[in-house]
Image: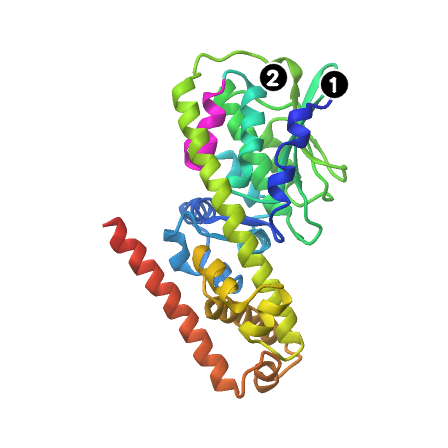
Amino acid sequence: MVSASMAQAGDIKNACHDLPIIRMSIVTLVVSRLKDMGLNVESAMARTQIETALLSLPHTTIHLKTFASFLEDVALRNNRPLVGFELGLITRPDEIGPLGLLFLLARTLREGMIAYNDFFPAVQSHSRLHLSENEELARISYCIDHAGSWPRRQDTEFTLGTIVALLKARFGAHWVPSGIEFEHTSIDGSAKLKRLLGCDFTYGCTTNSVLFPKKYLDMRMGTANDVLISVLKDHLKSLVGQSEETNSVEAATIDAIEFCVEIGQPCMACVAKRLDVSVRTLQRRLQSAGHSFRSLLDHYRNLTATRLEELGALKRDAIATHLGYAESTSLSRSRRRWKAALKDKYQYIQSEGA
């Protein structure tokens, strides 16, 4: 029997985004843990265009595909095929932030998972933690509602590992799930994975899931704090609202920029027309979301230029022309301007924090 609230929660929220995003607070946690493990992350960050300055901007978001690619790169370059699961299993609820604390403070596991899924868009969009149950077993499945988010094996295993860590935080360090199911095919290191999990696992399944005895769902815990739970929910509601407003504007604008670049008109007038709004309205919406047209155009151009250069099919001058530059030196200036703007934002946040 499927829990109706779990099946439906988050669908309306997630529909507001065009591309899956993840909050930098989670990315920063992952980067810190990878460094603690002695792994090389700087080269992977550079290859996937994750700027170091962003690590100090916890409420900023990046595309989930970028994060997933980063984890895949780290696993490959460091020869750690299980790095996603290793990360997840050492993640504490409090490190996840208000979302993790909300889960830990719930009266029962069922209430905790419903709340966790309801507010999951506060840290990651287009994603659900789906709870279902039969006569004996309960299942928590990790779903991403976006077909383009591939490859994502390490991201999947990181999330499943985090779910196991959350359950251990409630029921004790020696608690183990009944089983783990993966959508992807078998991998290297299966023996080590079984030692890490302490249970059986199956590849090539229709879902990515953690299975455990149903009896744990409604087992009452003595940690509930209604006042603190209410405060945490109010905070998470504000984060969900910010994510929906900011990222829907950003994603729609970048999508329009891509169209206008392809037809050779990378200007604000063309983008505004594509979005069916006036230039002034577009400026106002971007400003409210903390963006500018120039910053998003530079961002799109730089990411596209990097991708095309790595493919090696086009020379630099041809790439610059494709992106609407008169010459390749203009592309270089654009990259410097984008990095400078990011540095200024980082320094401003640092001064505000001080």
Kindly report the secondary structure that dominates the magenta region of the rendered protein.
helix
Q: Give the labeled residue for mark 1.
A: 134
Label 1 or label 2, whichever comes before in sequence order: 1
> Are dots 1 and 2 in contact, CB under 8 Å?
no
Residue 107 locus on image (x, y percent) = 50, 16
Look at the picture and state if 4 lies above or below 348: above
191 and 179: which is toward the camera? 179
199 and 275: which is toward the camera? 275
Colouring scheme, one of rainbow, by chain, secondary structure, one colour: rainbow
SS assignment at label 2:
loop
Q: Is residue 167 left or right of residue 8?
A: left
Q: What residue sits 53% from the left and 52% below the top?
A: 247
On residue 89, which mark appears? none
Residue 144 locus on image (x, y percent) = 66, 43
Look at the picture and state if 148 lies above or below 240: below
Count of marks, rendered view: 2
Residue 142 locus on image (x, y percent) = 64, 36
Residue 318 locus on image (x, y percent) = 61, 85
Look at the picture and state if 139 lies above or below 62: above
313 and 287: which is toward the camera? 287
Q: Which residue type carries mark 1?
A: Asn
Q: Is residue 51 left or right of residue 6?
A: left
> Is residue 62 something one can see in this rendering?
no
* Residue farthest left in this picture: 354
Residue 94 lies in magenta, yes or no?
A: yes
The stretch of residues the image draws in magenta is: 92-106
> Is residue 103 something one can see in this rendering?
yes
Q: What residue sits 58% from the left and 23% below the top?
A: 176
10 Å neighbourhood of mark 1: few (<14), some, or many (≥20)? few
What distance separates the C-alpha of mark 1 from that of mark 2?
A: 12 Å
On residue 217, which mark appears? 2
